[in-house]
């Protein structure tokens, strides 16, 4: 199908969009694969786009719970050291590290603003 011609979704393309979105593909990459525009993708596949990732993560979570119930030490450790978010799982330690870096960056930006203001005040006093 060429770009610009009328697009008609099929069960196959709906399944493909769902699978690719669940895997983390961008809308643009999926649209390119289907040879349609991103706008056409959203127009015809908004349900798949909006539900694929959460449904996939729910399935992963259910599988994890089953493994935990079976006594999988590795899965228990993973569950205790990771946190789910809309894009998948992230290490709690990494999340804490990222949060600390964000706080540090904000503090450095505030310090730079204060230093600039102090310099302005000193300069105005000298005049």
Image (tube, rainbow, N blue to C red):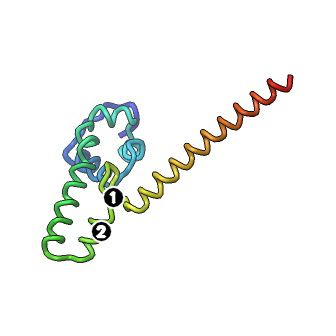
User: Which of the two discs, 2 and 1, labels the residue nearer the N terminus?
Assistant: 2
In the rendered image, residue 28, in percent from the top left (x then y), is placed at: 42, 42
Q: Within 10 Å of the Cα at label 2, are there few (<14), some (14-19), or many (20+) other Cα atoms?
A: some
Depth check, mark 2 against mark 1: the one in front is 2
- The number of callouts visible is 2
Outermost residue toward the right in this view: 127
Residue occupied by mark 2: 78
Alpha carbon separation for disc pair 2 and 1? 10 Å
Q: Is residue 123 above or below residue 27?
A: above
Q: Secondary structure at mark 1?
A: strand
Instruction: Looking at the picture, tell me which residue is in the foreground, 101 or 50.
Output: 101
Q: Which mark is residue 89?
A: 1
Q: Is residue 8 above or below residue 97?
A: above
Q: Is residue 12 left or right of residue 116?
A: left
Instruction: Looking at the picture, tell me which residue is in the foreground, 71 or 25.
Output: 71
Instruction: Looking at the picture, tell me which residue is in the foreground, 80 or 19.
Output: 80
Outermost residue toward the front in this view: 125
Task: Write the residue at 21% across / 50% down.
Answer: 55
> CB under 8 Å between callouts 2 and 1?
yes
Assign the C terminus to one quadrant of the image. top right
Task: Write the residue at 27% across / 34% down.
Answer: 44
In the rendered image, residue 13, in percent from the top left (x then y), is placed at: 26, 46
Q: Is residue 121 left or right of residue 69?
A: right
Among the 4 quarters of the image, the one containing residue 35:
top left
Q: Is residue 26 left or right of residue 51?
A: right
Q: Secondary structure at mark 2?
A: helix
Assign the N terminus to one quadrant of the image. top left
Task: Write the residue at 14% across / 68% down.
Answer: 66
Task: Write the residue at 57% across / 47% down.
Answer: 105
């Amino acid at each position: 199908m060429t770009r610009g011609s009328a697009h008609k979704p099929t069960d196959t393309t709906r399944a493909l969009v769902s699978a690719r979105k669940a895997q983390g593909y961008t809308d643009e990459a999926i649209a390119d694969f289907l040879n349609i525009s991103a706008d056409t993708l959203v127009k015809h596949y908004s349900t798949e786009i909006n539900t694929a990732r959460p449904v996939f993560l729910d399935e992963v979570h259910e599988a994890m719970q089953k493994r935990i119930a079976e006594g999988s030490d590795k899965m228990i450790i993973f569950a205790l050291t990771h946190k789910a978010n809309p894009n998948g799982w992230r290490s709690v330690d990494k999340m804490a590290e990222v949060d600390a870096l964000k706080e540090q960056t904000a503090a450095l930006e505030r310090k730079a603003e204060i230093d600039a203001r102090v310099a302005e005040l000193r300069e105005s006093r000298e005049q």
